[in-house]
Image: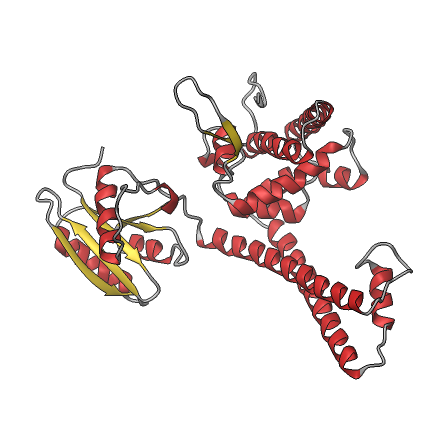
Amino acid sequence: MPSDTTTYVGLDVHKRMIAVSLVVAGTGEVREWQETNDATVARRLARRLQREAGGPVSCCYEAGPTGYVLQRRLRSEGVMCTVVAPSLIPVRPGSRIKTDRRDARKLGELLGAGLLTAVHPPSEEQEALRDLCRCRVDVVEDLLRARHRMSKFLLRRHCVCKESGNNWGTRHMNWLRRLRFEDAASQVTFDSYLLSIDQLGERLLQLELQLAEFGAQEPYREPVGWLRCFRGIDTVTAVSLVAELHDFRRFGSARALMSYLGLVPGENSSGERERRGSITKAGNGHARRLLVEAAWHQRHRPAISQPLRKRRAGQPAWVLAIADRAQERLWRRWTRMTFRGKPTQKVVVAMAREMVGYLWAVLQGPPIADTPIIDTKP
């Protein structure tokens, strides 16, 4: 239970201003003001909070585009600050007025009542690697759009590549570079689209090389090496998962991690009625997308390919044992669910959820002797 001697503070943080609402311990008096959000706001705000409270201070603000900079600066000034999940903040039915002052006051009151859910913030290094992974995703999306623009431009002029059935492969790109148009305006348009594709392809290659370089360094080298032992997970996926989740040990069980990733079914049950729906899609969507992509590889019969064998070289035997068990179980479940007529998309999501259990088991570290490696009961 929260201490009665602690002063609770709600912060509504924006790009230029911060609305502050302080609930004085003991008296319940509310003091409100605004601060300019600049480089010196943390020191200025920390001093005023300590002066106004006259004792322990605990403050919070919602996770959002402003990131974790304010939290880190306040903690360096000796003020306890928490970033809370906006989607889990209780909402009062019937409330139709929303202002920065009211939002800050509500956060302070809910913090004192212990009704807020804290977000686990990454370190500055972990956040930087996560931004690099998401930068690569942005480039992939931009490259896809550039290719779509080029393909529709060629379709309108009925330019069809007959040299290769694999679009955007080596032969297809060589054919594009030899293509010429009689109309000068069309040639300028084509050259612009082709230049965009080449530039984005080179950017993507450089970002993947950088991710591989960071993944080979401490403290990421070991967990990335362990994840690469699984079928469907190579360097980029492994580094991205480590960067997005950044601390697997904070999840007490595999099911907690599944729930965090939004891979568990939603439920709307009451009384004798029991109704379960599609997955909740809560939590980290980037990591969930990577896991679903990796789950597609589980449709193949268990085997150790040559690239997978190279990725497994030098890894601990207990990691390989878990990876082999995952490969065998997921293929059996894929086959069984497909035979029963389950839609492929549902099967893939189910495989992604089960894979999370094996990944969680690996990233907890070496198992204790005489204990089961993993429990993946559905």
Residue drawn at the location 53% of the way across and 45% of the way down:
285
- When asked about the image quadrant of residue 99, the answer is bottom left
User: Residue 153, percent across and down?
Assistant: 75, 68
The image position of residue 297, as x and y in percent, is 72, 37
Query: Vertical placement of 265 versus 64: above or below?
Result: above
Q: Residue furthest right?
A: 163
Q: Residue at x 56, y 16 (%)?
A: 370
In the picture shown, does residue 77 fall above or below 358?
below
Residue farthest bottom in this picture = 184
Quadrant, the N terminus: top left
Nearest to the observer: residue 248 or residue 193 = 193
- Quarter assignment of residue 230: top right
Q: Position of residue 276 (x, y in %)?
A: 50, 27
User: Going by the image, does 133 lie left or right of 17?
Assistant: right
Tell me the residue at 87%/72% (across/down): 178
Return the residue nearer the eye: 366 or 301: 301
Indicate how the structure is coloured in the image. secondary structure
* Residue 347 visible: yes
**Rendered position, 202 above or below 282:** below
Would you say residue 264 is visible in this rendering?
no
Residue 26 is left or right of residue 37, and the answer is left
Left or right: 113 as drawn, with respect to 178: left
Q: Total number of numbered labels?
A: 0
Q: Quadrant of residue 204?
A: bottom right
Kindly identify the residue that appears in the image at 81 percent across and 70 percent down: 157
Quadrant location of the C terminus in the rendered image = top right
Q: Position of residue 257 (x, y in %)?
A: 50, 34
